[in-house]
Structure formats: structure tokens, C-alpha cells
Amino acid sequence: MSDLVKVRRDGTLTLFDGGGPAVELDVTYTDGDFSADGLAAYEDRTFIRSRGSIIGLRKGDDPVGSISFNVHMRQFTDATAGEPLDFVKGTKAGVALTSTGGTAYEQFICGVKISIIGDASPAVASWSKVIWSVDFSEGDPDTLSFKGETMDQVTVTGL
């Protein structure tokens, strides 16, 4: 157990594909604003009622969670090293990546993990099936905003 409170300087953000071994991309130039909901999400609830009174509860649909982070824009694409925008669209350095969704998903799906290492007790949260949308905005600096929808439960260690 760690008594050290973690801060954004301790985090590393990594995108990964479904190949064996997985191709990874460490996301750099971030604000340290990674956000994810549903760390303890459960299936939707179906309430069983008798004349308006709840008498039971059943599991419903799986939840769709959300993830977001911002990257300082350097370039949209890079044919030699790869950029986060390339990766979430299914390529790294011009090479096609393997979707983590397999053939059951038409869109390219990849994973993301946040590793928070401030001491000897690292904390890692990982989602293997995420579909992404990306927005661009000008400013000082220009920003790429990544928004992901998760289609699986989070895997956590050290939390």
C-alpha cells in the first residue's frame, strides 16, 4: 500500500492495439488531464416490481463508459514515428494495426492504459476496447481532444 498521493506528473498514457505482441504508443505532450468514468461501473439495472414496489433486481445492458484527454498538437500525422491521431485511426508509422475488437467490430478499436508511478506501488487502469473521436482546436497551444467510448470493464491494479 502506498501513502504517497499521486499527481499528474506521475502518469504515463499508452495506446495499444490487439496484435500479439501488442503495438504500443506512449502519448506525449499531454496536459495531464486524462479522465475516465465508470471505474466501478456495473450493468444497467432492471428493476423487478410488484404493484410499484421493488422486489428484485436483474442485470441489464453493459454500460458504455467514457474517456478523454488532450494532446498539444505538433502534427496530425507522422509516417515514421506515429501520432496519437494515426493510432486511433488504425496505423502507426504507416503500418496497419490490429483492432482489439477483432472481426466482430467494423470500426477500428484500440486500448488505452494510464500508468501512475509515483513510488514503488504503481497504479494502472486499462481498457482494451475503446472507439475514439478526436477534435482539433486552435490556441496557445493548438490542441487535439480525444474522446473515447469504452466497451469493456476497466482492469485495475494498485488502486
Image (spheres, rainbow, N blue to C red):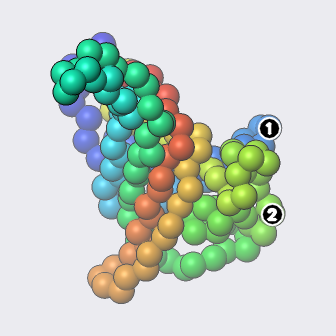
Q: Position of residue 121 (x, y in %)?
A: 38, 21
Extreme front residue here? 51
| Residue 20 showing in the rendered view | yes
98 relative position to 138: left or right: right
117 relative position to 89: left or right: left
Q: Earlier in the sequence, mark 1 or mark 2?
A: 1
Q: Nearer the viewer, residue 51 or 136?
A: 51
**Residue at disc 1, secondary structure:** loop
Extreme bottom residue here? 138
Q: Is residue 140 above or below residue 131?
A: below
Residue count near mark 2 (Cα–Cα under 10 Å), binned few <14, some 14–19, many ≥20:
few
Alpha carbon of mark 1 to alpha carbon of mark 2: how far?
Answer: 15 Å
Q: Disc 2 marks which amino acid? A: Val
Q: Which mark is residue 53?
A: none
Q: Position of residue 118 (x, y in %)?
A: 33, 32
| Residue 124 showing in the rendered view | no
Picture quadrant of residue 87: bottom right
**Residue at disc 2, secondary structure:** strand
Which residue is the site of mark 1? 20
Q: Is residue 118 above or below residue 35?
A: above
Q: Disc 1 marks which amino acid? A: Gly
Q: Is residue 134 above or below residue 39?
A: below
Tag 1 and tag 2, C-beta contact below 8 Å: no
Residue count near mark 1 (Cα–Cα under 10 Å), binned few <14, some 14–19, many ≥20:
few
Residue at left 31%, top 16%?
A: 56
Q: Report the number of numbered marks.
A: 2
Q: Which mark is residue 95?
A: 2
Residue at left 55%, top 79%?
A: 75
Picture quadrant of residue 64: top left
Q: Is residue 55 above or below residue 13?
A: above
